[in-house]
Every structure is written in structure tokens, then in C-alpha cells.
Image (cartoon, rainbow, N blue to C red):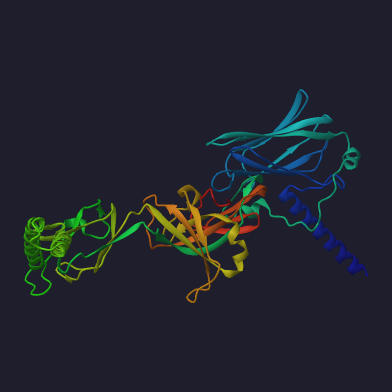
Amino acid sequence: MKIASILMAVFALFFVACADKSADEHGHEHEAGGLEPIAHILYSDKTELFVEFIPLIVNSKTNFAAHFTILGDKFLPLTKGKVTVSLIVGDSGIRQSADSASSPGIFKLALIPKTAGKGKLVFDIETKDFNDQIVINNVTIYADEHSALDNQSEHASQDEISYLKEQAWKSEFANAPVIKGEFADIIKTSGQILAAPGDEMMIAATSSGIIKFSGSKTIVGSEVSQNRSMFTISGGNLTENNLDANIKEAKANFDKAKANYDRSKELVKDKIISEAAFLEAKNDFENTQSLLNAISKNYSASGQTIGSPISGFVKNIFVNEGQYVEAGMPLAVVSKNKKLILQANVSQKYFGKLQTISSANFVPIGSDQVFDTKKLNGKIISYGKSTSANSAFLPITFEIDNIGNLVPGSAAEIYLKSSLISNALLFRFLLLWRNRKLLCVCANRRRKFSKAGNKNCCR
């Protein structure tokens, strides 16, 4: 029994020593009876202060473990500098300084109040890069421990999960105050950027012959103006469907019909020929004239030139120089590139939400830039009400302006936004650049972006 009693005493001393050590490390010393610590977290534009201490009592030493975080794109612990804490009550005050951190971000300080009443705690920070000051107002200094116990706040729930500053500093993080504002539900999906209907024109061969390109403008991606020559079609040495021979034949037929028509006009006046014969000569003249005009349009000695019907850029070319083409054959596509279509493919489970979609953010594959359909004068032009045999997804389509750096045909990540909820409670917590991705938690929803500085993360 004696040995057992000795062992129990040793274990008791061991646990007390460990508890005292843990309390000293975090500034949670409970040397004044059952007093619970008071915690404060305050911000300036440069620094965040988290400090925890037992209530201040006259002639009783109070220890402070002040945690200082430098604000910026990433929140970092303050490792070098001088911190002074001052307790000011009325016209009197006491202070104590720490010239260095006891551990990264933590400065240990202590004060022994001399006067009861209301005062303020002032923390002055001096570093080589900046000076700062954080003030805790309306701090109560109690005359004795009994007064402090009588005014003690209710103890926090034991079910709460603590996330210590020492833990936060080990990861890259930043936070911002909770605010009220507009919030939209988000549906993440994929889609494609397409050319808008009517924004493209097909150029077709107007006759048969050998195709020749008209200079450097007949290159995919090159800009062209309206009526700018792009191709020339010539008959060359073709024995059939020879354009040059066809034009000569059409010209000869036209000249013959014209002479016959001119003669018929005089003969019908003298009633030498019938009215029916005159009308037949006139009809023949008009038909040969129309044919000649059609095949000789834009014709020169080098061949028939074909120009762009609109101003824009060359999107596709379907023929090779020197190739034989027939009338009506597609030669190229020219696009104005002013309007584009953003088509998102939405899962069927979101069918009920499609009518609430008002806009979208999208990121073209291979780009870090985020585009907003609202800023591109975007509008919804249709949304799918059924799936097709080739896809189980429902399409929702926006028409947007092309600002010059969007490529038709490219894929995109799309974030569909529902109608805005006004006066919603918003918060942002950022974990920056983990595997080159930004994880953004917005109103309990997670979003991934490839750029940490994106201000639209939670919008």
C-alpha cells in the first residue's frame, strides 16, 4: 500500500507538471482560481492580433500570449520585431515589451494592474518594414478575484473544434470578414465556344475551272475586307467546262440575239413579222444577256475573281491551289468573329434549375483568364428541354460579344450562375496555390480556379 501511494503521488505530480507546461505554451494559465480566459481577435490594415488572457485583477500577474499575423495575399506569422503591451486606466498606465518572439508569431508579455476600473490594452508593433498599433477598448480590471468570478462569462462548449494559429501558419491561407451581398447558386460544367449563326459566310465557286489563290490574304486566320479578291477561276487548257470558251460562246450568242432583236423591233412596226415572233426574239435576247452577265461577272483576262462577301477573317479553306473545282463547290468560310456562342452541357439532374440561370463565368481550356457573360453583353438564347441520341446532357446557350481573344471551337470550363439572391451572408476562406489550384469555399460551396488572385471566386 505504501508503494502504491508513492506511485500515485509521482503520477499526480507528473500530470500537474505537463498541464502547467501546456498552459504556459499557449498563454492559458489559470493561476487565479477557476477564472476562464478571455479571447480577442482584432485586425488593422497590416496585422491580425489574437490574444487570450485571464481577467485582469489588481496586484495579480496576467500573462499574455499574443499571436501576431502579417496580412497580405498570404497570412504569415510575425517572426521579427518588438511588441509592447500597455494597460491604460484613466491618466495612468503600465507597459511591458518583448524584443523577440518566443516562437514564430507568438510574443509573451505580462502585466500587473495597479488600479481597478475600465481601461484599454494597447499593443504596439515595431518591425523593420512597418509599425502598427492595435487597441482593445473597454477592458475591465477587477479589484479582486471574487469580483472577476461574479462577472465571468459562460464557458464555451466543449464540442467546439479549435484551429490554433500555430496550425494555420503551417498552411498557406488568408481570410476575410463575413459580409452581406448578392449570391448566386453555381452549377459547374463544361462546354464549347462556337461561332454565332449569321456570323459566318460560305464562299462557293461560281463556275467550273482551275482555282488560283489571290495573294497572302487567302490564308487561314488572315483578315479580309468585303469584296476583297480571294480566288481566281480560269479555264486553262480544259477541253470541257472551259470558262474562257463558255464566255466566248455566251458572248457570241448574246451578239446574235441582240442583232436579231434589233431587227425584229423594226420589222414588227411594219407588220412584216408577227408579234409572237418579236416576243420570241426579245426573250432570246434577254436570256442570253442574263447568262453572259452571270458567267462574265468579275471576269478578266486571268479568269473569274471571287471576293469575300463580308469583312472578317478566313476561318477555313477547303481547296488547294491548282485544284479543279465545279460551280457551287465550297471554297472557304469567312467569319465576322463579332458574336460567339457559349454552349454549356448540363446534367439532367439540373433540369429544374435551368430556367433560373441568368449568366455564367467561363474559363477557356489552356487559359487562366475568367470571362463573365454579363461583361460580354451575354444573353441566354435557348436552353434544352430534351436530350439527343448523341448526348445525355441538356444544352444551355449564351450569345456573347467576342472581345478578340476567344477562339471559336475551343472548349471551356463553365460556371452557370442562377438568379441572384440579395442580402445573402457571404464569406471567403482561401487556401492558396496548392498544386497550382485555388480552393475557394463560398457559403459552404467549393469552387476550383487556376488563379489565386481571382476576385470573382465567391461571386
Q: In this view, does 440 lie to the left or right of 303?
A: right
Picture quadrant where residue 22 is located? bottom right
Viewer-nearest residue: 212 or 124: 212
> Where 29 sits versus 44, above or below?
below
**Outermost residue toward the top in this view:** 91
**Image point 59% across, 37% down: which residue?**
45
Q: Residue furthest right?
A: 1
Does residue 158 show up? yes
Q: Residue at x 55, y 67 (%)?
A: 385
Residue nearest the viewer, comparing 31 with 45: 45
Quadrant location of the N terminus in the rendered image: bottom right
Residue nearest the viewer, comparing 419 with 260: 260
Residue 146 x/y as whole percent: 91, 40
Instruction: Answer with left or right where residue 32 lies relative to residue 391.
Output: right
Figure label count: 0
Name the side, left or right, on which 187 lies relative to 7. Answer: left
- In the shown orientation, is residue 269 left or right of residue 20? left
Residue 276 location, quadrant? bottom left
Rendered location of residue 158, percent (x, y) = 81, 57
Residue 52 x/y as whole percent? 74, 44
* Vertical order, 92 against 338 (above or below): above
Q: Can residue 212 be seen in this view?
A: no
Picture coordinates of residue 423 (x, y %)?
67, 45
Residue at the front extreme of this rendering: 271
When the figure is inspected, residue 91 is found, relative to residue 123, above or below; the finding is above
